[in-house]
Image (cartoon, coloured by chain):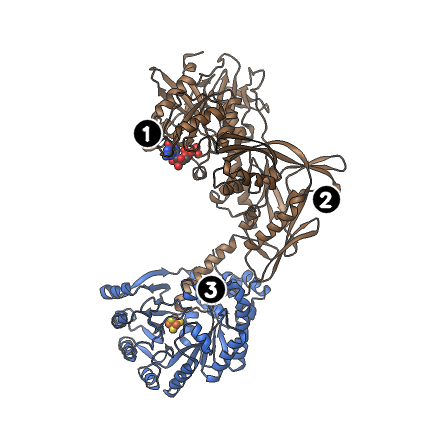
Amino acid sequence: MSDIQSRIRNFSIIAHIDHGKSTLADRLIEYTGLISQRDMVSQVLDNMELERERGITIKLQTVRLTYKAEDGEEYYLNLIDTPGHVDFTYEVSRSLAACEGAVLVVDATQGVEAQTLANVYLALENDLEIIPVLNKIDLISAEPERVLKEIEDVIGLYTEGTPQISAKEGLNIKDVLEAIVTRVPSPKGDAGAPLKALIFDSYYDSYRGVIVSIRVMDGQVSTKDKIKMMSNGKCFEVDEIGLFQNGLHPVAKLSAGEVGYLTASIKNIGDTSVGDTITLEKNPAKAALPGYKKVNSMVYCGIYPVDGNNYEDLKDALGKLNLNDASLLYQPDTSAVLGFGFRCGFLGLLHMEIIQQRLEREFNLDIVATVPSVVYHVALTDGTVIDVDNPTNMPPAVKIEYMEEPIAQATMMLPTEYVGSIMELCQSRRGIYIGMNYMEENRVVLEYELPLNEIIYDFFDALKSRTKGYASLDYSIKEYKKSELVKLDILLNGEIVDALSFIVHREKAYERGRKVAEKLKNEIPRQMFEIPIQAAIGGKIIARETVSAMRKDVLSKCYGGDISRKRKLLEKQKEGKKKMRQIGKVQVPQEAFLSVLKLDE
Amino acid sequence: MRKISLYIHIPFCKKKCIYCDFVSFDDSDEDIEPYFSALFEEIRAYKTILNAEYIIDTIFIGGGTPNYVEVRYIEELMGVIFSTFDVDKDAEISMEANPCGHSSREDFERYRKCGVNRLSIGLQSASDDMLRQIGRQHTKAEFDEAFKNARSAGFDNINVDIIFGFYNQDVLEFENTVQYVIGTGCEHISCYSLKLEEETPLYDLYMDEGIDIESEDFEDRMMYHTSCGMLEANGYVQYELSNFAKKGYACRHNLNYWDIKEYIGLGLAAHSYKDKARFFNTSYMDEYLQGIETNGSAIEDIEQLDKEKQEEEFIIMALRKTEGVRFDEYKKRFGEKFLDKYKDETNYLIEAGLAALSKNSMYLTDEGKDFANIAMMEFISN
Ligand SMILES: Nc1nc2c(ncn2[C@@H]2O[C@H](COP(=O)(O)OP(=O)(O)O)[C@@H](O)[C@H]2O)c(=O)[nH]1
Ligand code: SF4
C-alpha cells in the first residue's frame, strides 16, 4: 500500500432528514479550509435550489478535504454525499460502497428515526465503520444521554467517545475529523491489479459530456486510457481525470483507494449507470464489482403541457433533465383528453414530484400530471403476462386471468401515542401487520407490508398529519402479490377522462370513487353549465357529484375609478384560466389532477 | 379644442349603508371645511394643466352624498370650476343626491342655479323594510318627496339608482321597486346588481349567516332580466349593462368612461385618464389634505398604458355598452380591422352564445351580459 493510500479516508455522512447532515458537511469543508467561511454559500453540497428548499439531496456532490491530524500527518478525506430519500436507496447504497466509513449524524433532540435505521443497515451491508455523532447539542432540548442510549439499544453501536457537536455553531467539529482519521480504515485495494472503478454518480456537463464520479477499487486509470463499462461493454477514451477539490481539479491518474472523476466524451448518461464497474479495455478485470443492478421505475405518470402547443418545449425539458438523471424515463404518449404528452417513469413519489416541480420552475412550463400508477403484472387468459403502468392500457376484465401488484415493506417510527391511529391508517390502506418493537418507552418501530399503490396515494402526508409530523417512514419493494384490482374511470360531463383513471383494489373502489368525485367537485370551478362528475367501473356508475352551473360573472358597476382595476382583475382571471386544461367543454385546473391523490382527510 | 370630463368626489355621508365600500365617511364632518378648501386648491392647480386647449364637456359631482354637505359648498365648488376652467355651455353637469341630504325644493333650486343640470338620486329600493335593513337613511316617502322637489325646482334630467340581489330580497319586491321608479317618470335609471364587498358590514352579515354568495346568483339574474324587460317595455332603452335611459337621456359623462375618453378626477380617491395614463389620488383624508397643502397634488400612483392595455380597456369597456365594440371606432383608434385581429376570439364567443355581430359592431347577447367577464377575458392579451 502506498503511503498516500494509507492516508486516504473515504466516508459518507448519513442521517435522517434535517438532523444536520448538510450543515455538518459545511463545517467539515470550512474547518479543513477548502473554502473559506466567507465564500461559502452555506451548504455547498446541496446546491440545487429545489434541494435546498426541501432540505434533501438529489444529486450527489463529492469533495476532497485535506486535514492535518493531531498525529501530525496530512490526511485526504473524500466526503461522498448521499441522496437523502428513500426513492434513491440504490444510489445511496452505491455511494456507501465507495466508502470505508460513515458518519452517522443523529439529532440529539430527536433521536433515531426511520431513515437513520435504514441508512445504518445500508452502511452495515457495505461493511462500513460507523461513527455516530450527536448533533444539535447547543439546543436546550438536546438529550444526549437518552439518545446515546437509544443508539446503543436500537442500532447496537458502541457509543463511547461519540463526538457531541453543534454543526450549526461549529462546536467540536475537530472531534469528528479525528474520529474519521483514527477509526475509518484506509482503503484497501491493489494498485497493481487490473482496473476496477465503481461508478457512484454521474452528471451531464454541456461542454464535456458526462462527468463520472468514481471510486478506484483496484488498479489505476490515467488520461488517454481506453476504458470499458462492464455492464454493457461500451468503450471510451479518457479525456480528463481529477479530484473533487475546488470544483474539478485535474490530475494525471487515480489509483486504488482514490475517489475522483473522469470525462471521456460520453454523450449519454445512460451509458454510465450508477453501480457499474469501469475497467480498462486492454487489461480488463475478470469480474465486475458486486452489487450492480438496473434500477426500475416504480411509479409512472403522464405529463402533458397545459397548452398543447408547448409539447416540443416539454420534450426538450424532459430531455435536458434526463441528461442528468438517467433514472427518469419518458416516452411520447397520447391521451384522448390531454393530447400529446409523455409517459414518465420515476424511482418513487418524491422523484416524481421533484421532476414535476423542476419542469415548472426551471423550464417555466405549465403541466398537467396524471394520477400516478405503479407497475402491475397482468396475466392474460392466453397465458402471457404483461406489465401495465398506465390504467389506459389495462386490458378488459374478460381477458385478465389475474393481476399482481407490488408490495412494499414499510418501516415506520413513531411516538407510542400514535400507534393506534397509524395502525388504523395502515389497515385502511390494506396493510398487513408484521411487527412492532419498542425502541424505548415512548417510541416504537412499526413494520407493515403495504401495497405500493396505497403508499403513492398520499400515505406519507397522512402519516405525517396523524402524528403531527413525528413519524418517519422508510420502505422498499419486497415482492409482487396477486390482488383483486379494477380500473376506475372518472367521467366529466359524460366523457371519460383517461388522465384521471386509476387502478384500485376492488374493495376500495367504491369509497375511492366517491372521494375522488367529491374532491373534483371542490376543485372544478363553476362554469356556464352544470357539470356531472361520475366514477365508474367497467361502465357501471358508482358515484356521482355535480358542479352546479355558474349563473353570472359580471361586474355590475364600472365607472372612471374602476377601469384599471377591472382590467387587472380580468388579467388575473385570464392568468388563472391559462393554468386550466380544457377537457371537452370543461375547464379543469391543474390542481384537480393532483387533488385526486390527496384523499385522506 | 380637446374635450375632457371632470369628476369631483365628495366623500361625506350621513351614515354608511351596510353594503358600501366607497370612499366616504359618516364620522368626519369636521373635515368638510378643510376638504373643500383643499379641493378648490386642487382645482385651481389644474388650471395650467387643463389650459386653453381643453374644454370641459361633462362634470359629475359624486360621492358619498354631495347634498349631505351644506349647499353653499356646492355653490362655491361650481363657482371655482367655472372661474378656473373653460366649461362648454352645453355641458352635462350631474350631481348625486340622496333623500337624506339637502333636498327641499329651495335646495334643489340652488343646485340648479349654480349650474347643476342633471341629478342622480339614490333610491335603491321602494320597500321601507329593505331600506332599513340595508342601512339607508330615508324612506320611500322621503324619496318621493325629494324627487318631486327636484322636479318642481326644474330638474328635467333625473336618474334614479336602484339595487338588487340582497339575499333576503324576493323577486316580487324588486319588481315593485322597478314599477315604482318607472312611475316617477324619471329620465334615466341605473339598476345595479349588489356586489358583496369585503370589509363591509353586509359582508360580515353574509359570513355570519353562512350565506353562499353564488347561491344567490340565480335570483339575481331573474331580477336582472325581469328589470331589463320591464324597463325596456316602458321606454327605457338599455345602453349599458346596468344603465337605462329614455331617448336622448343617456349619461354623457359615464359614456365618456366607457368610450375611453379623457377625464380628470379631483378630490379624495378620484381617478383620472389623460394622455394615455391612468392616475389617482390617495384615499386617505390626511394624506390628501397634506398633499394638496404642500404640493397642490395628492396623486398616489400613475400607470402609463401601452398600446396593448389601451386596446384591452377599449374593448372591455365597449362590451359594457349595448352597442358593443364599434368596428369603425376600433379601426380609427388602433388602425386595424377588429375582426381580422380577433377572429378566433369573436368566433368563440359567438359559438358560446355570448356575443353577436351587427354590421358595424360586436356586442354581448342577453346571455353574454350575465357572463360579461368571460367574454371580456378573451381580449386580455398575455
Ligand atoms: N440548533 C442547531 N440547529 C442545527 C444544527 N445543525 C443543523 N441544524 C439545523 O437543522 C436544520 C437541518 O439541517 P440540515 O443540515 O439541512 O439537515 P439535513 O437534512 O440532514 O442535511 C437546519 O435548519 C439547520 O440549520 C445544530 O447543531 N444546532
Ligand atoms: S349613500 Fe352612497 S356613498 Fe354613502 S354610504 Fe350609502 S352607498 Fe355609500
x, y percent for residue A120: 50, 26
Q: Seen in the image, is A427 located left or right of residue A440?
A: right
Give the residue at mark 2.
A396
User: Which residue is depicted at the point 64% across and 43% down?
Assistant: A504
x, y percent for residue A414: 50, 35
Instruction: Check residue A200 in the rendering and tell me which mark sits there, or answer none.
Output: none
Residue at mark 1: C-beta within 8 A of ligand 1: no
Element carrying mark 2 = loop
Q: Earlier in the sequence, mark 1 or mark 2?
A: 1
Furthest residue in direction left, as rendered? B294
- Residue under mark 2: which chain is it in? A
Furthest residue in direction bottom, as rendered? B152
Residue type, label 3: Tyr
Residue type, label 1: Ser
Give the residue at mark 3.
B206
Front one among B340 and A555: A555
Give the residue at mark 1.
A36
- Residue under mark 3: which chain is it in? B
Front one among A30 and A543: A543
User: Which residue is depicted at the point 57% across and 38% down?
Assistant: A423
Looking at the picture, do discs 3 and 2 lie on one chain? no
Q: Colour of chain A?
A: brown
Alpha-carbon distance for marks 1 and 2? 64 Å
Looking at the picture, do discs 1 and 2 lie on one chain? yes
Mark 3 neighbour density, 10 Å: few (under 14) some (14–19) many (20 or more): some
Residue A79 visible from this viewpoint: yes
User: Which residue is depicted at the point 55% across and 15% down?
Assistant: A283
- Chain identifier, colour blue: B
Q: Is residue A563 above or below residue A420?
A: below
Residue type, label 2: Pro
Which of the 4 image quadrants contains residue A296? Answer: top right
Picture quadrant of ligand 2:
bottom left
